[in-house]
């Protein structure tokens, strides 16, 4: 992976400066721009290419959720990493449905923030531990209510494919999925490749977006 170009979008200048200071010594990451609201985000994206945007939710004017939807529509190659003080499930799912592939909290330490940026830039998903716990709780709740009937897509998936897709969205690795479902790692890998082809997506981030948008997580 080459240099990762990052934008920091938050309505508090002191917070943006703090994030930039944390990242400036990381050789692989460069903060190339910053924005204080959604309108500025869209303007900056037209001016300078970005690989990852650290996006706050609670911004004046166009908030982070609305901004994420516009970024996903107009700049689909930009990876969105939500950086928020909100840990409630409705905020998390709204950001993921809007196109974010990662969600970390503002109390995150430097090392985790760097790991999240690198992970999202590589096309994978990243969630803080607390965020992952909320998603798992929400998934268990949905499973108890209606099993796998929450699927909204017209693309038919088998029960096993749905199970694997849900676990992928919750950041389980292939060995972890194999252990949880009592199947071989090779079988998990085959299902993952089939899911990529069947859903017409390129990477794990695409699978996560599909799972969120179709009510599987």
Image: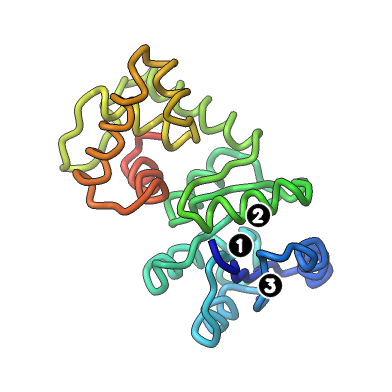
Q: CA distance from mark 3 to mark 1?
A: 13 Å
Which residue in the protein does label 1 denote? 55
The residue drawn where x is 44% and y is 27% is 139
The one nearer the camera, 188 or 65, is 188
Q: Secondary structure at mark 3?
A: strand
Q: Picture quarter containing residue 191? A: top left
Residue at far bottom of view? 47
Residues packed near mark 2 inside 10 Å, few (<14), some (14 to 19) or many (20 plus):
many
Rendered residue at 32%/54% (across/down): 202
The secondary structure type at the circle numbered 1 is strand
Q: CA distance from mark 3 to mark 2?
A: 15 Å
Q: Quadrant where the C terminus lies?
A: top left
Q: Using the image, tell me which numbered label, if any, was put on residue 156.
A: none
Q: Secondary structure at mark 2?
A: strand
Q: Which mark is residue 31?
A: 3
Of the two numbered discs 3 and 1 on the same chain, state the one appearing first in sequence.
3
Residue at image position (71%, 69%) is 11
Query: Quarter-wise, where is residue 147 in the image?
Result: top left
Name the one closer to the observer, 83 or 25: 25
Q: Marks 2 and 1, Cα distance to the nearest angstrom? A: 6 Å
39 to 57, vertically: above or below:
below
**Disc 3, disc 2: CB below 8 Å?**
no
- Residue 70, given in percent of the width and then of the height, sits at 43, 69
Label 2 sits on residue: 83
Q: Residue 68, image x and y in percent? A: 49, 63
Q: How is the image coloured?
A: rainbow
Labels 2 & 1 near each other (Cβ < 8 A): yes
């Amino acid at each position: 992976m080459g240099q990762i170009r990052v934008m920091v979008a938050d309505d508090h200048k002191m917070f943006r400066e703090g994030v930039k200071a944390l990242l400036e010594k990381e050789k692989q990451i460069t903060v190339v721009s910053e924005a204080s609201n959604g309108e500025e985000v869209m303007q900056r994206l037209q001016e300078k290419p970005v690989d990852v945007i650290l996006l706050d939710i609670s911004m004046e004017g166009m908030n982070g959720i609305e901004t994420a939807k516009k970024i996903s529509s107009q700049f689909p190659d930009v990876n969105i990493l939500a950086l928020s003080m909100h840990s409630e499930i409705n905020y998390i799912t709204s950001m993921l449905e809007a196109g974010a592939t990662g969600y970390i909290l503002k109390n995150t330490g430097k090392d985790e923030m760097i790991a999240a940026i690198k992970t999202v830039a590589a096309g994978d998903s990243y969630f803080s531990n607390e965020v992952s716990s909320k998603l798992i709780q929400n998934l268990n709740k949905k499973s108890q209510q209606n099993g796998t009937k929450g699927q909204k897509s017209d693309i038919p998936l088998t029960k096993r494919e749905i199970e694997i897709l849900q676990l992928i969205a919750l950041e389980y690795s292939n060995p972890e999925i194999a252990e949880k479902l009592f199947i071989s790692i090779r079988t998990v890998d085959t299902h993952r490749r089939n899911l990529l082809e069947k859903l017409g997506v390129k990477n794990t981030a695409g699978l996560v977006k599909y799972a969120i948008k179709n009510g599987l997580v």
